[in-house]
Image: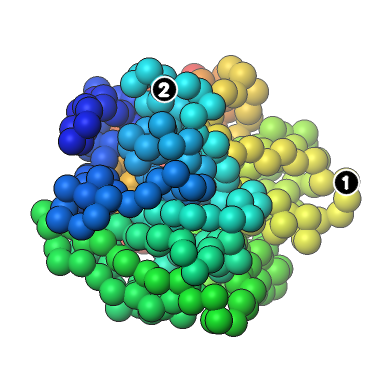
Amino acid sequence: MNRLTTSGAGYDLARHPEDPRDPFRAWDAADAYLLQHLEGTDGADPVDLSGRVVVVGDRWGALSTVLAAHRPVQISDSCLAQRATEANLERNGADADAVRLLSSRDTPPDRIDVLLVRVPKSLAFLEDQLHRLAPAVHAGTVVVGTGMVKEIHTSTLNLFERIIGPTRTSLAVRKARLIHCTPDPALPRTPSPWPLRYALPADAGPVAGRTVTNHAGIFCADRLDIGTRFFLKHLPARSGPDRVVDLGCGNGVVGLAAALTNPDATLTFIDESHQAVASAEETLRANTGPGARARFIVGDALAGAEPGSADLVLNNPPFHSHQATTDATARNMFYGARRALRQGGELWVVANRHLGHHTALRRIFGNCTTVAGDPKFVVLRAVKR
């Protein structure tokens, strides 16, 4: 847990899931710089927050918690960010309903007076969100983006300029920068180009030629990533009424492959991203008959799964949390998979070879075998004994 101090108060903040081993804070210099600007302590006039305030992409709820007295609307693609926000509001004595939590799939407010945007890692996701928000912005709306210098590029500014209006940046402070955008109501309101759909390549195993749906912001949305491509060639061949989990499902291609090779299986698609789960559902429905048995869950890995509820878990774990490299998410997935699997159930993982996930799997499961590998990737199998 870390303390964020503003001119008015201090706030104890934590990420979700809270882990004492996690070296990363729930806020950074970009969050602090934006809050200073809103207060007027950066030399500018304070921003009037009496109207409808919308916070987009608040990574762990730091901005929303500090601004809770203004009853902002938070729009987030991450259920982990939403849960962190709820916990941080409670931790700091704010009402549970002080912040209205919306997902990236929800309809945004029809009027926005102050729009605060934490620049995401995905330029496509920023584009999609700005398109969705632009109709609610008016000539008097204050639009301020924030991010670390390494996160803000010419392409970032061009999106604000093209979709919202004239844009400029601030000086850098502690390697963070603000984006100031003046809404231009005369700009044409064009629809978002997302989602993107394409046919999977011929070497994609059981899903070759199938159409995949990709909403903005999911990993490798414009092509099949090479790790998944390798995994598809080495998935287990199974039959019967298996309960299969596509954990960290992204666009659902791995789960779709499991469904096509074993029509008797029941599939569960889980991701912390609302955009990913929406992509997975559209991908499955477009490529299977109405009888396909599947659930789609936006959640914290397998934290809520019943013990013994899965026969097979398929996982391509991320190794980044925003800009930070970490194995915390993978560890959380592995522990959750072990709890959810029945005795004899299996976890199959594809990952970059250099990450060394075999060590964590041996510690958690007591065993790990290498199914396949090439110079870059490895497919690992762990069995719950």
Q: Nearer the viewer, residue 127 or 9?
A: 9
Location of residue 62 in the rendering, given as x and y in whole percent from the top left corner: 33, 37
Query: In this figure, which colouring scheme has been used for the structure?
Result: rainbow
First in sequence: mark 1 vs mark 2: 2
Q: On the picture, is 107 further left or further right than 357? A: right
Instruction: Give the residue displayed 59% in from the left and 82% down from the top.
Output: 188
What SS does tag 1 mark?
loop
> Which residue is under mark 2?
94
In the image as oriented, which residue stretches furthest toward the left?
174
Q: Does residue 310 sit above or below 283 in this rendering? A: above
> Which residue is under mark 1?
291
Residue 54 seen from this side: yes
Quadrant of residue 382 within the rendered picture: top left
Instruction: Give the residue displayed 63% in from the left and 30% down from the top.
Output: 311
Instruction: Give the residue displayed 36% in from the left and 54% down from the top.
Output: 118
Q: On the picture, is 370 further left or further right than 168? A: right
What SS does tag 2 mark?
loop
Instruction: Give the residue displayed 59% in from the left and 56% down from the top.
Output: 111
1 vs 2, front mark: 2
- Neighbour class for label 1 at 10 Å: few (<14), some, many (≥20)? few
Location of residue 348 in the rendering, given as x and y in whole percent from the top left corner: 50, 41
Residue 159 seen from this side: no
Q: Nearer the viewer, residue 46 or 62?
A: 46
Q: Nearer the viewer, residue 320 or 161?
A: 161
Q: Nearer the viewer, residue 126 or 381?
A: 126
